[in-house]
Amino acid sequence: MTRWLLLLTFMGCDTVAPVAARFVPILEKFNEEWAPVDMECSPMYSSRKPKKCITRELKCGDEVEGNNRMGRSSFDDDFYRSARCYAITPPGGHSGPEMVYRVRVPAGHTARAKLTSDCGDLDVFAMRWNDKDLECPKAKHAHRVGECQADTTPRGGTASMSATSKDETYLIAVDGKGSADGNFRLKVECDGF
């Protein structure tokens, strides 16, 4: 115990805690940033630059790995605020590139977009967007987003979606705080109700 205290004194909690969490997994519960890194950060995961807004279509059960560096910079904090993703802008802003995926949630289902982003401070946004004329909303259309969920948790997070009586289309954006980019893993999980 004395060795740990001595090590903690010289190295600091931010350095020692992630190492200690490898041996004492319960420590991860105190601070999720202490969990061991679960993905390779180098080389950059392959991602194709989308021709327009949508990177690709996903469905329930799909999992994709990518890197938002190849994305477009269509959405920023003003857009997310106008779309009611959050009331107060988190520190850092979202001025950099994002990867956007389209998901159709079947009627009578809830869905979760689970993001793992150990390599950069990336956030996940799920926006209901059933507009047939526009692939993705522009800044002037943000007020037409039906619903938006955001999770700005470090190292990933989960955004929820639902469809009650009819199928709903959602756009899932993986966007970096402060123009951050990095490898990520995104999984879509669905449950019927």
Image (cartoon, helix red, strand yellow):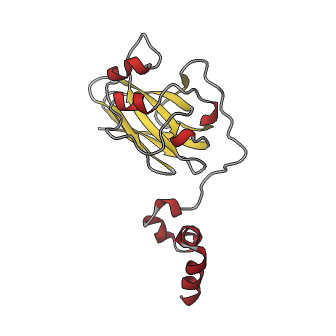
Q: Which of 38 and 30 is in front in this view?
A: 30
Q: Can residue 105 be seen in this view?
A: no
Q: Answer with the quarter of the image where residue 169 lies.
A: top left
Q: In this view, does 158 lie above or below 161?
A: below
Q: Nearer the viewer, residue 140 or 115?
A: 140
Residue at the top extreme of this rendering: 133
Point 47% across, 43% down: residue: 114
- Residue 94, percent from left and from top: 49, 36
Q: Nearer the viewer, residue 146 or 104?
A: 146
Residue at the right extreme of this rendering: 43
- Residue 90, percent from left and from top: 41, 44
Q: In this view, does 45 lie to the left or right of 31?
A: right
Q: In which quarter of the image is the C terminus?
A: top left
Q: Is residue 12 left or right of residue 167?
A: right
Point 38% across, 18% down: residue: 141
Point 51% across, 70% down: residue: 25
- Residue 83, percent from left and from top: 35, 28
Q: Answer with the quarter of the image where residue 166 lies.
A: top left
Q: Is residue 134 above or below residue 34?
A: above
Point 66% across, 28% down: residue: 48
